Image: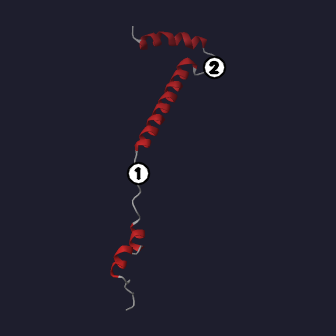
């Protein structure tokens, strides 16, 4: 017998006992919630593991690199070139 057939036979029995003022999710609701909680926990654990393996080095800002003077090239001739002469 399939599970859907078993549930189909149990639904009319549950409808007779159903108190319309008190409806709870029951065991099935708890199991679904628990499975979702375990799934989220496993995903977060996996994400933390993958983020720990990331080797991220920020690329230098191109504007900041262009604004810096070239120190070793200027001092090679002994004197720095003056901008107005």
Q: Which residue is mark 1?
A: 56
Q: What residue is drawn where x is 40% and y is 54%?
A: 57
Relative to 83, say whether 21 is above or below.
above
Please state the horizontal and vertical placement of residue 83, each as a whole percent of the image: 39, 87
Against 67, residue 56 (above or below) is above
Q: Is residue 44 above or below residue 3?
A: below
- Residue at label 2? 20
Residue at point 52% right, 11% down? 12
Q: Classify 52 as above or below 64.
A: above
- Which of 5/64 is in front? 64
Question: Image quadrant for the N terminus?
Answer: top left
Is residue 70 among the parts visible in the rendering?
A: no
Q: Is residue 5 visible?
A: yes
Give the mark nearer the N terminus: 1 vs 2: 2
| Figure quadrant of the C terminus | bottom left
Callout 1 crowding tier (Cα within 10 Å): few <14, some 14–19, many ≥20: few
Dot 1: what SS? loop
> Judging from the image, what secondary structure is the residue with disc 2 in?
loop
Residue furthest to the front: 78
Q: What is the x, y in percent for residue 50?
A: 41, 40
Q: Is residue 80 left or right of residue 15?
A: left
- Say the numbered circle drawn on residue 39: none
Residue furthest to the bottom in view is: 85
Closer to viewer: mark 1 or mark 2:
1
Q: CA distance from mark 1 to mark 2?
A: 57 Å
Q: Residue at horizontal 46%, vertical 39%?
A: 48
| Residue drawn at (33%, 78%) of the image | 76
Residue 46, percent from left and from top: 44, 35
What colour scheme was applied to this rendering of the protein? secondary structure
């Amino acid at each position: 017998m399939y599970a859907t057939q078993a549930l189909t036979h149990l639904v009319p029995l549950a409808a007779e006992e159903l108190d319309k003022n008190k409806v709870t999710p029951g065991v099935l609701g708890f199991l679904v919630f628990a499975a979702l909680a375990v799934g989220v926990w496993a995903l977060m654990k996996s994400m933390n593991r993958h983020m720990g393996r990331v080797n991220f080095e920020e690329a230098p800002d191109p504007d900041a690199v262009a604004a810096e003077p070239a120190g070793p090239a200027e001092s090679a001739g002994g004197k720095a070139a003056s901008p107005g002469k």
